[in-house]
Image (spheres, helix red, strand yellow):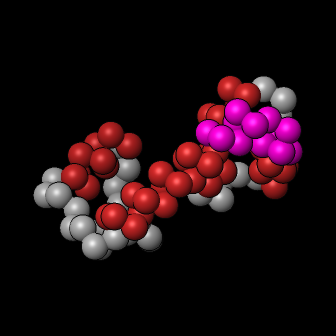
Amino acid sequence: MADCEKALRELDTFLDGELSDATRTAIHDHLDGCPDCLSAFDFHAELKSVIAQKCQNDEMPPGLLSRLEQCLHIELAPGGDGSA
């Protein structure tokens, strides 16, 4: 994955561990050789960590789940955790 734009588009998916082994390896290799993308990766990883820490005890605002479902065109299982 030599293209920075492609690597940057996949950063969130990379951080979530939702990529195939081949794509994950390609992004990892790209990050090893591209300081600009590595800097963006570090920023995304830190931001994701800070948001998770700051929001871990917050309750979901009323209506947010239904708005997300409408945006994503999905229905979540009762309990709101997305498990079936």
Q: Position of residue 57 (x, y in %)?
A: 28, 73
Residue 77 left/right relative to 59: right
Q: In the figure, is residue 51 to the left or right of 29? A: left
- Segment tinted magenta in the rendering: 29-40
**At x 55% / y 47%, what residue is drawn?**
44
Q: Main secondary structure of the magenta part?
A: helix
What quarter of the picture does the C terminus occupy?
bottom left
Note whether 68 is above or below 61 in the view shown: above
**The magenta stretch spans residue 49:** no
Which image quarter: residue 52? bottom left
Q: Is residue 48 visible?
A: yes
Name the residue at 70% across, 33% down: 36
In the image, residue 6 above or below residue 71 = above
x then y, percent, for residue 38: 71, 42
Q: 70 or 2, which lies in front?
A: 2
Q: Is residue 69 left or right of residue 48?
A: left
Q: Quarter-wise, where is residue 75 in the image?
A: bottom left
Q: x, y (%) of residue 50?
A: 43, 59
- For the point 44% across and 70% down, the residue is 83
For image coordinates 68% across by 26% down, the residue present is 5
**Residue 35 covered by magenta stretch:** yes
